[in-house]
């Protein structure tokens, strides 16, 4: 398992050094490599998570953040 984690880390490091167009192309390649049941399972999981978050927000259990702040945080975290 450690070899797999190191491999993923090495791939991630290389990936983040690629131009944005290449990274976007790899997203398509990876997505297209999934089987239909895998895609459907992921889409169903995201739909369920979206509904859970909407319900939590509407119930006052979850606060919202400005998208620009969220993306700035993500960008900063990816650089670490």
Image (cartoon, grey):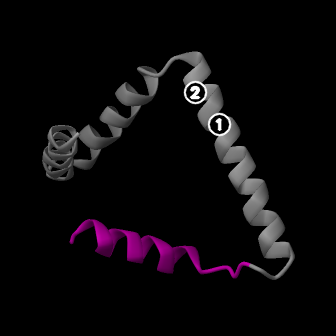
Q: Residue most toward the right?
A: 59
Q: Are marks 1 and 2 in contact (CB under 8 Å)?
A: yes
Our reading of the magenta stretch's main secondary structure is helix
Label 1 residue SS: helix
The image shows residue 75 at horizontal and vertical percentages of 33, 69
Q: Is residue 50 above or below residue 21?
A: below
Q: Is residue 27 above or below residue 49?
A: above
Tell me what residue is drawn at x 73 percent, y 64 percent.
Answer: 53
Q: Residue most toward the front?
A: 1
Residue 39 is marked as: 2
Q: Is residue 71 above or below residue 38?
A: below
Q: The N terminus appears in which quarter of the rendering?
A: top left
The image shows residue 58 at horizontal and vertical percentages of 85, 74
Label 2 residue SS: helix
Start and end of the magenta stretch? Answer: 62-80
Tell me what residue is drawn at x 40 percent, y 76 percent.
Answer: 72
Tell me what residue is drawn at x 15 percent, y 46 percent.
Answer: 6
How far, Cα to Cα, is label 1 from label 2?
6 Å
Tell me what residue is drawn at x 14 percent, y 39 percent.
Answer: 3
Q: Is residue 65 magenta?
A: yes
Residue 43 is marked as: 1
Left of 60 or right of it: where is 77?
Answer: left
Between 18 and 10, the residue placed more toward the observer is 10
Q: Is residue 67 magenta?
A: yes
């Amino acid at each position: 398992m450690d070899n797999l984690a190191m491999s993923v880390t090495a791939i991630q490091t290389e990936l983040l050094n690629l131009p944005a167009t290449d990274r976007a192309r790899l997203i398509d390649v990876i997505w297209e490599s999934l089987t239909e049941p895998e895609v459907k399972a992921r889409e169903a999981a995201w739909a369920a998570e979206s509904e859970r978050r909407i319900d939590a927000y509407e119930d006052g259990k979850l606060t919202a953040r400005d998208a620009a702040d969220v993306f700035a945080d993500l960008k900063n975290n990816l650089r670490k």
